[in-house]
Amino acid sequence: AAMGADHGDARPHAAWGNGEEGGVAPSRRSAQWSRSALFWLVCTAAAGAARASITCPTPLTPQEAFQCSASAADELKFTAPSRWYLLTPGTVASTLTAQYPLSWIKKDARCCRHCVWSTGYPRIDPLVLASDRTQTNSSMHMDCNQFATDFTALDSSGDSRLTFAEMEPYLSIGVNSFLVKNQRLNTETAFRISDFNRDGYISKEEFLVLRHFWAPVHLSQVGPLPASEAVKLEDGPLGGLFIDGNLVEVFMTNVVNTILEQFEVSKTWACGCTGGVICPADCPWNSGSARESNSQEMNKILRTIDLDGSSRVSIEEHYFSEFADRDGNGVVSRAEYYVSLYPTTLDDGSADTAAIGYHFQKHDLNKDGVVTFLERKFSLADRTEDGLLTETEWVDADLPNFFGPFDGHKTLSTGVVDQLRYNYYSVLHECALQGVRTYQVTINETPLASFCTIVARAQNAGPWIDNTDLAVSTRRAADAPPAGPASVLAALELRERGEAAYAAGAPGGG
C-alpha cells in the first residue's frame, strides 16, 4: 500500500477500549522489512561505511527550509544522537566540539528538523528520536522519508500540492479513521488549519509539518481526549487536531521504550556488546539517560509547548515554535517570516518579499519589528482579512476567554475586536503566560507575573487631553484653594466622561 505504515502497521492499543482498534496487526511483508532493515544496518556498520555529512544551507525559500535529503535522514536514524555533531560537513572529527543533539539540529541541521522529535527533558540535553523502528516494530510513523513518499502517493494530479480530496485518504486511515469514526477528528477542519498560507492546498512542506506534529498520535495510537462523553472534538475550533496532556504522557512513554530497544540492538553491532561482553565506556549507544519524565518535568513541557495557555497545543503553535522561529527566541523576525510557510502572496498574485514586507507588517500588530504567536493568531483568526475579529472568528481561532472574553474587548459601536483592542488583550495575555511558566499554574488562575511590567501611555488627545469648558474649569479648580465637594464632583465627572469615551471607542482612547 502506497501510504506505508498506516495501511497495515498500526498496532492496537489498550487505551482504545470497547474492542476498537486504530489499525490491524503488522503484515508479514512489514516484518520481513524490519529484518531487512536491521540486516542493512548491521552490514553497513560492519563494512565501516563512510559517514555522510548533513548540509543545510541558509534557506532563501520555504521549500529550502525542509530540504533534508533521504541520505541525511538515514544518517540521523542510524547514528547515535550523541554523535550527530560529527555529521557536520567540511571539518575533521577530532577538531569538533561535542554538542547536544537537539542543539546541533537546530543550529546546523535545521532542514532536517522535521525528522527529529524531542521529549523536552532533561532540560539541558533532552531525549531525541529520529525513527520509531526497532527489531520488534517496523512502523514508519516517525520516518520523514516515508512522509515525502506518502505525499507523492497522495498527489494524484502531480502538481506538488494536495486538494482536500487528495488529502482525505490520509485523514481516513489507521488511527485517524478511528478518531473520525468516534467524532474526535474533523477532516475538513484538519485540512484547513494545516494550510498555513491559506491558498486552499496542502503543500509538501505543510504536509511534512502535519506528519511531524501528528506523529505522537500515530506512534501512541491514541488521540486527544474530550472533556466528557458529551463533548464532540470534531465540532471544536481545532476539529480535534491538537495535542493534550494525556497524549503527551503516552507519547513520552512510547518514546522511552523505543529508545531503550533501539539502543539495546544498536550497541550490539556498533560496540560488540554480545555474549556477556561489557560495553566499552565510549560506546555511543548508551541508554543511561533514557527515563520517563517526572511530574515537574511534564508540567514544564506542557507549559512550554502551549504557547497561548489554552491547555491544548495546535499545529499552529507547533509550527511557530519548532519551525518558524528558527533562532528560538520566541518571536519571528522579518527574515524568518519570509522563509516560513505563512502567506507571502500579494493581492495581485505577485510575490511578497522581505523588502516589501506587506504580510509581515500585517502580522506585526504593535510594529516592534517581530511577530509573536499571539500576533500570528490574530491574522489566523481574521479569516475575512478585514482587520477585525467577529465573535465567530474569535471562537473559531480557539482564543481563550480569560483576561476578558470577547465581549470585554469588542467595541460597543461595531461589536468587533479591532487590532488596537486585540493589542490590549495580548499584553495582559502575555503577562499571564509568563506567570503560567513561572508559577506552573493554569492560565485561568490569572497568574500575572510580578516581574511583567505593563507601561501605559496616555495619548495627547481626548479624552485624556480635553479642552472643553468643563476640563478648563476643572483644572482651574484644581489650581485654586480647596473649595469643597463641587470641584471634586467636577473632576469625577471628567473622569467618567473619559471612561465613557474609551468604552465607546472614541479616537485617542487608550
Image: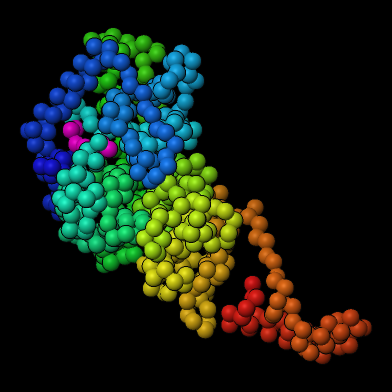
Type of secondary structure dominating the magenta stretch = loop
Question: Which part of the image, by quadrant, shows the C terminus?
Answer: bottom right
Query: Residue at (50%, 42%) from the top-left corner?
Result: 328
Q: Is residue 11 visible?
A: no
Q: Give the range drawn in magenta.
A: 137-144
Image location of residue 39, percent across then percent down: 17, 20
Q: Is residue 473 left or right of residue 243?
A: right
Image location of residue 242, percent across then percent down: 33, 54
Vertical side of 439 occupied by 483: above or below: below
Of all residues, the one furthest to the right in this rendering is 481
Quarter of the rendering containing residue 215: top left
Q: Can residue 149 be seen in this view?
A: yes
Q: Nearer the viewer, residue 15 or 73?
A: 73
Query: Residue at (42%, 42%) from the top-left corner?
Result: 60
Image location of residue 107, percent across then percent down: 46, 33
Image location of residue 214, percent across then percent down: 29, 47
Query: Residue at (37%, 40%) from the top-left corner?
Result: 64
Q: Is residue 171 magenta?
A: no
